[in-house]
Amino acid sequence: SKINFYVDENKEKGYAILKLNKGPVNSLNLEFLTELNIQLEKFEESKEIKGVILTSSIPNIFSAGLDIMEMYQIKQDRGSQFWTALQETWIKLYGSNKIYIAAINGHSPAGGCLLSISCDYRIMSKGPYKIGLNETLLGIKAPFWFRDTMINTIGYRETEKALQLGKLYSSEEALAVNLVDELADSKDLITKAEEQMSKWCAIPTVARELTKSSMRRDTLSKLIAQREADTQSFIEFTQRDSIQKSLRMYLESLKKPKK
Ligand code: CO8
């Protein structure tokens, strides 16, 4: 079967590198999210691994976000499995005790941005890459937990603008608003992520974990308390004719020949 990601575990150093590898654009569908959740669970339970560098093995693309085909012509059963898997990914990542560092090697819109901002630290490659929550450009509203994670990263006012405009930030703009913490030349991205990881790994683990969970607990509880209602509202919203029309138009715009 197709290999959707690679894991390099370095037990000596105490961290792993997880490289998303679902061509062409690492879009997140039900099967991919399910595999990812199993892997995140393995990391969480590992005694040797203190942290994970999350990156992609596809040049110029971190992740294109949710697979639009999971939302286009959505059906109740698959739709709810899909959304439940995505919630699980976010809860596992944002709520992880481990250290997650995103090495953003390329485009990172929407769900790709969510994965990034669910980590503890972000380094982005310099280059013509964009990151942000661009949902409004697809005619949809970013879910409240996407929004809250963004607020926790770049603050309320910047999020208010960014989400309404569906703003996709260049790497320089992302650095300026703290959407990413650091920029790197592509060739140095992983080295820089490893340097940063060593710094985080050197902090006393229990104190760091308790601090992280105290910062994130309230945001996580909001979704955990209403997962089923959130899933149902995702399906009802996505089934609307107007949303289906927007998604169809957006898909067509993606398929248009470039230039
Ligand atoms: N889902 C499905 N297919 C996709 C996606 C996607 N997200 N992104 C790209 N593709 C497809 C393209 O249609 C294209 O297909 P084909 O080869 O059949 O023409 C193929 O992947 C390659 O794409 P590109 O040619 O566009 O590749 P580039 O390298 O030129 O560009 C980009 C890569 C920049 C990532 C570009 O593809 C892009 O901008 N993609 C769209 C990204 C996007 O806007 N994603 C948003 C998804 S929605 C989301 O994540 C959160 C939704 C929250 C839902 C809330 C509902 C209530």
Image: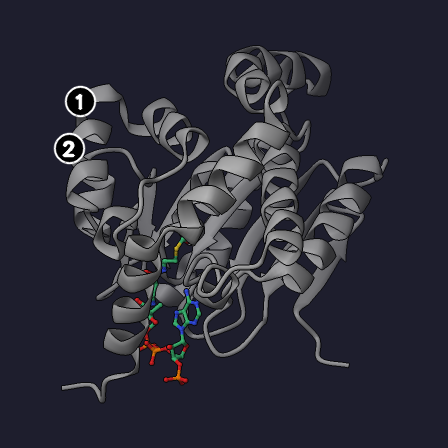
Query: What quarter of the picture does the N terminus occupy?
Result: bottom right
Count up the numbered dots.
Answer: 2
Left or right: 56 as drawn, with respect to 6 = left
Disc 2 residue: CB within 8 Å of ligand 1: no
Left or right: 60 as drawn, with respect to 177 = right
Who's the residue at 39% across and 47% down the image? 113
Distance from disc 2 to disc 1, alpha carbons, whole Å, reads 7 Å
Tell me the residue that label 2 is attached to: 161
Who's the residue at 64% across and 43% down the image? 84
State ligand 1's quadrant: bottom left
Q: Is residue 159 visible?
A: yes
Task: Give residue 74's position: percent from left, percent from top.
Answer: 51, 60
Q: Is residue 119 visible?
A: no
Query: What quarter of the picture does the C terminus occupy?
Result: bottom left
Task: Give residue 238's position: percent from left, percent from top.
Answer: 42, 50
Left or right: 73 as drawn, with respect to 206 = left
- Dot 2 falls on a residue whose secondary structure is helix
* Callout 2 touching callout 1 (CB < 8 Å): yes
| Badge number at residue 169 | none
Amino acid marked by disc 1: Arg
Tell me the residue that label 1 is attached to: 157
Amino acid marked by disc 2: Lys
